[in-house]
Amino acid sequence: MMSDLFSRYVTGDNIAFKHAKGISDRSGKEFHLFHEIILFLGGDAELISETVHAKLKPQTLIVIPKETYHQVLIKGKQDEYCRCVFQFYETEDNISLIKNGMQELFITESDKAAAYLFSKMMRLAENPNEELSSVISQAVLNLLLDEIKAKKSTEIINSLNDGLTKQAIEYIAERLTENLSIENIARCLNVSPSTLMHTFKKNMNISIHKYIIKKRLILAHAKISDGEQATVAASECGFNDYSGFYMQYRKMFDMTPSTHMRK
């Protein structure tokens, strides 16, 4: 491994901050249950989501609400990929700020205030202080969320412009709990199944089948969080085989549906 590669972390209550250069650990994590704010610092990479396809430039700020499909695809050398990442869950202290600033995924150029806040965390990551890390992280995150809530989605650099993929995403969202065979979707969109699968995978970097499964798992997780029985949630979200649902749920969330119900 090259000597200039690094990963520096700061962790606090419900918050994690990472300043890293080198290999990404994002494979298979297209959805997650925490919110994320990324400051892209360098490398050859692009963001892929349901609404945005964009080549990233240094000092790009990426705002990703929880349960939102996204990938940062590394196009160039892994060892040139550099970024800062805030990952955080909702708490009583930040929920109002999150609701004001984290409604949808968008990207924009970082302003001086946001860059300064990230620089504070970068310095803290170089010399962690166990007693102060949690307090500082929460304070900086709150200030960053306050800055972000003023940003508008109109600042998106490049939106998804492939018509077929966009239609498929909208069709899936409207009928997520119904029969969503690839053949049925293709028929409704007036294309062949092979064209649909090829185009979707090319534009989203995920198969349409896997995309549907993960969207359904996210929906089931939300239902279970609201008190729904796991077996009922699975059935309502289009899973006819509970054992299959159980295994996929455990793989995606690193816990069982019953474990989640007890939390």
Image (cartoon, rainbow, N blue to C red):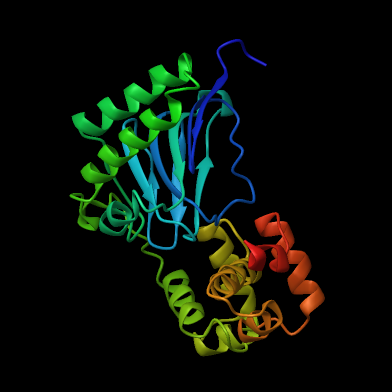
Q: Between residues 154 and 246, which one lies in front from this camera angle?
A: 246
Residue 166's place in the image compared with 171, above or below, is: above
**As rendered, which of 173 and 197 lies closer to the eye?**
173
Residue sticking out furthest to the right? 243
Q: Residue at the spot x=31%, y=34% of the render? A: 139
Relative to 241, say whether 33 is above or below: above
Where does residue 137 sit, x and y in percent of width and height? 39, 32
Q: Position of residue 95 (x, y in %)?
A: 34, 55
**In x, y percent, where is residue 244?**
79, 73
Relative side of 108 to 254, left or right = left
Q: Position of residue 70 (x, y in %)?
A: 49, 54
Q: Is residue 263 left or right of residue 105?
A: right
Residue at (56, 84) in percent of width and height: 185
32 or 259, nearer to the observer? 259
Position above or below: 142 against 34: above
Which one is in front, 167 or 156? 156
Name the residue rendered at 46%, 83% in the picture: 174
Which quadrant of the structure image shows residue 183? bottom right
Q: Quadrant of residue 23?
A: top right
Q: Quadrant of residue 60?
A: top left
Instruction: Residue at the far top: name it.
Output: 3
Image quadrant for the N terminus? top right
**Side (left or right) of 248 relative to 144:** right
- Which residue lies at the image location 66% right of the left edge and 80% below the top edge? 229
Total tally of numbered discs in the picture: 0
Quarter of the picture holding the C terminus: bottom right
